[in-house]
Amino acid sequence: MARVYNFNAGPAVLPLGVLEEAQKELIDFRGSGMSILECSHRGKEYEAVHQEAIDNIRRILNLSDDHAVLFVQGGASLQFCMVPMNLLGPGQTADYVNSGAWADKAAKEAKLIGSVNVAANTGKEIPTRVPRVEELKLSKGAAYVHITSNETIAGSQWKSFPKTEAPLVGDMSSDMLSRPFDANQFGLIYAGAQKNLGPAGVALVIIRKDLAERAPANLATMLKYKTYLDENSLYNTPPCFAIYILALVTRWILKTGPANLYRQNVDKAARIYAVLDSGKFYRPTAVKECRSDMNITFRLPSEELEEMFVKEASKQGMKGLKGHRSVGGIRASIYNAFPVPGVDALVAFMKDFEKKNG
């Protein structure tokens, strides 16, 4: 078996142990005589998986009883419209902080639903950064304040979160469970699973229960958070396999230790940034104090060298290093499950590549 170092931004690397566990259980799930892909979502086999996924999330984040854990299909992109559909009432304004491409997409969707105030906008700045708290121009009586905790394309990240009077809503798709934070500070958190949580197909939503009551009566059933809350995300058939993998990933996080993972994530990123900062050959694209621990973005002196970098790295078993098509450059996504030896391999390759081409 030849496993590469997978730097893709999502779908992304999963813990090897999780893949092996899923492989072992795929044909006969825990003595049921069925695959987890075949089990009824109303059966006891899947019920245990579903509840473990919820319990693990609650435990990792130390969630209060005021918050519910939901599983919704459609990824984070569906949440761009579900949030305002549920939380933005007539005559209200929602504050959106534009820190890059994904925050901008969320704001554009919200503008289709109701009134939006862009509280700060650093989306076009180069080098990229997230706004400082003192830059935020928040609306009085806002329905909620929306931020994107980590910009996957730009490689910038909020290192601490603003305190807001209005409920704080966070798109945490690309750094969920990668670091400690107070989840109870948020009114709503959403995260597409395919970065740090599992495969594509499910979005994790954590919502303060009272906010689920805001949904207008005429909102379609499947677009109401209250539907998922009341039915434990089982109103319809959920993406059972994606939630099963999420349960295994969160079990792995608990076994590894969230604090241990955080220290490892910071160390992995620091080792790559140290190479980037050691000379003028590589140019990091995010402001130093806003650099992401999950998505490390940088440029080389020319696009030709960037193309050569990606091709040669791929030949050495390092895949997915090409930057997002909208910005180019190089992007190394090193989520929770990305192995330390993969960082060592990239660091050695970067040093050698600079020596040969600098």
Image (spheres, rainbow, N blue to C red):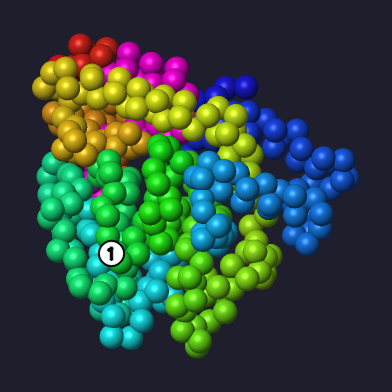
Residue 197 seen in the figure = no
Q: Residue at x 41, y 69 (%)?
A: 83
In the picture provided, is 317 more to the left or to the right than 169?
right
Residue 128 magenta-drawn?
no
342 part of magenta stretch: yes
Residue 171 is situated, as x and y percent measured from the top left of the image, at: 38, 55
Residue 119 x, y percent position in the rendering: 18, 64
- Considering every residue shown, the one lying at the far bottom of the view is 218
Q: Residue at x 67, y 30 (%)?
A: 20
Q: Which residues are magenta?
A: 325-350
The quadrant holding residue 80 is: bottom left
Q: Quadrant of residue 41?
A: bottom right
90 or 308, nearer to the observer = 90
Q: Above or below — where is 14 with respect to 207?
A: above
In the picture, measured across the screen, residue 128 lies left or right of residue 345, that is: left
Q: Is residue 28 visible?
A: yes
Screen quadrant of the N terminus = top right
Residue 308: image location, x then y, percent: 27, 27
* Residue sitting at x 63%, y 71%: 230
* Residue occupied by mark 1: 165
Q: Amino acid at mark 1?
A: Glu
Name which residue lies at 79% across and 46% down.
Answer: 35
